[in-house]
Image (tube, helix red, strand yellow):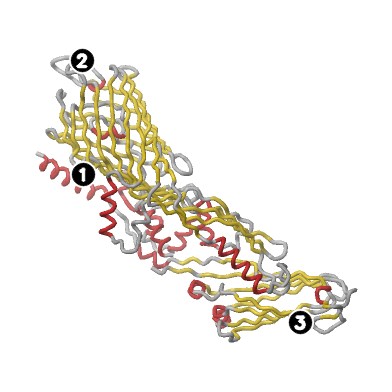
Amino acid sequence: MFKKTVTYVIINLVLIVAFMSCTKAVDFNQVNDFKITPVFESSLVYLNEPASRFLVKGNEINIVKDSVNIDFFNNQFNADHLVKAEFLFETTNSINRAFQVQVDMFDTNNQLQHAFTFTTDASPSNSDVKNEHIEVFEGNALTALLNSSKFVFTLYILPGVPIDNTTVGSIILRSKAAFYLSIENTL
Amino acid sequence: MRMIYLLFIGVTYFSFAQNKQLLYGFSDIPQALLVNPGGKVTNDWYAGIPFLSHLHVNAGTSGPTVYDLFAKDGLDFNMKLETAIYSMNSSDFFSANEQLELLSGGFAFGNSYEKTKYLSFGLYQELDFIAYFPKDYAILAFEGNQNNINRVFRASDFNASAELISVLHVGYNEKVNTNFTFGVRGKIYSSLVNINATKNRGYFVTQNGINNFYDHIFNLDLEVKTAGLASLTNNGSNTDSTIKTLKKRVLFGPNLGLGFDVGFTYQLTKQWSLDASLLDVGFIQQSKDVENYKLKGNYVFEGVNPLFPETGTGQTAEDYWNNIKGEFKDLFQVDTTNTKYITWRPVKFNASLNYSFGKKKVKECNCLKTESDYQNRVGMQLYAIKRPKQPQLALTAYYYRSLFKGMQVKAAYTIDSYSFSNLGLGVSANVGNINFYVMADNFLQYQNIYNAQSVSLQLGFNYIFKKNEN
């Protein structure tokens, strides 16, 4: 009796499912087309210093230099997904001297990968003078960025009226990076 | 990435809910006592056919369907994905429930003249899963933060829990008088595996900064608690050993809990009746094999000042940068703890108001007319379940009919979080002493199963003995 019932039920279930449940065409391989392209922005370097900061014992210094080791770029995720990067540097100068910033990028073997400079105009009237520089990393420059793990920043004070205790104004640097990612299906 | 993907597809495809609107009040089926321990009993004793007496699976998503994403319609997949992401919000969910009864039985007792008491018992296995759509995480991954300056990305959008348990239960049902029946069921839960990430807090936001373009504010308090999982994912474990371990845990596994169900049926008039039940009021103490992963930290990043670092004197830019790296490392440092925790079972509430009509024509005698002699019944049912973010509700209108001896059907229309067009049908048939029932949901969506927001199926076989067959 039990066996008979089970058989009866199973046959009916199969029939129910066969008649009732239909599907329309789906294509799960569309997953392979998966691609997202987020853009992340991050603050980079900054400084905000009065003219007096460029005096050591009453004498003007015309170079300030330092380096940082950054292993942020040099990794597999960025190598796979970073398609473009853009660094924006914005300077606001009210000192009557022009400045130049040089950025040198080195790999782990201390080989120079990429370098760029940008300048800031002097401000004779001590009003804010704004300059902008955009460094775009694509192609070879992007490869260079991905190889870089050490950044050397050098701030040159370009020739002009000497800075002393009476020099007014300040130099402000703000910067940010935009990272364009492309993450595709890796299934 | 691959994991997120599989998860996304997985939850979209195999999602379940647990409303048993067709079984509720279907007193011809012994398992109706599992959804209302105070329901009417119509048999003298029964025994569930082991492993076949009750299987319940119910698939659903309140968000887009498989068809929305994968239809072969020539549209760009990423456009469809984008539409899906933007159409959902953080209270949309994918939820899963599956129950398999291993053993069950019941018998009436009391004085020999009229047995008004009924004892039922059994052991079933249950899988319960819910994941909310992590909207803010999805938007951040999809767009990035560039176009979302000042947008607060909430960490609480990551909210999910899963449990695999077995339940050993004994229920008592008593028909106090012709109008009132009540019942209680005690439950011992044995947790096989538990994963709980429902208490995430914090946020990430990018704001316009003072010293630099942006301040990136990280305020994170995330935790994923697990019990019974660490020993399964140890090195050296494989599918076979995992199944073996899980089998051992079915009866009195490492983490136990207690709970109860209560319910009643009240006959308002000969034709009107009211019933209600509260299920799974209980907890599980997750104390053994516990491994929790916690990420907690606050940090505001505004970039670095390499030339004139403002940290302590004598510190080089390198030291300063290392400090920042340290802060980030601490921020994203995942701590593993073994702190015990308690999980509460998802409490369920059912209630219904019913009206019976259409008397059966009985030739011989018309003396003992009771409610069960009506051939038709209509009613409204309310169902609610407590979920991590908010309760989910469903409202059902149904029609029940006793077709002929030993065959009953129930048709139901349900409105819930999944859809407004859920038609379901349930049949219970007795062939000799064998009772078989099958119930399925969302018939309208069977035209294209991939486009179904939810699909449920319940079926089972019992051996039923009745003294007074109608």
The residue that mark 3 highlights is A63
Instruction: Determine contact: label 2, label 3, CB under 8 Å.
Output: no
**Horizontal side of residue B6 vs A69, given as left or right:** left
Q: Secondary structure at mark 2?
A: loop
* Residue type at numbered disc 1: Phe
In the depicted structure, whether residue B110 falls above or below residue A174: above
The residue that mark 1 highlights is B51
Q: Secondary structure at mark 1?
A: loop
Instruction: Determine contact: label 1, label 3, CB under 8 Å.
Output: no
* Residue type at numbered disc 3: Ile
Question: What's the CA distance linking mark 1 and mark 3?
Answer: 82 Å
Q: Residue furthest bottom?
A: A111
Identity of the residue drawn at 26% across and 47% down: A20
Count residues near mark 1 (Cα–Cα under 10 Å), then give few for <14, some for 14-19, many for 20+: some
Front position among marks 1 and 3: 3
* Residue type at numbered disc 2: Leu
Residue A162 position within the rendered picture, expressed as x and y whole percent measured from the top left: 87, 81
For the residue pair B155 and A66, the one nearer the viewer reads as A66
Question: What's the CA distance linking mark 2 and mark 3?
Answer: 108 Å
Name the chain under label 2: B
Dot 1 and dot 3 within a common chain:
no
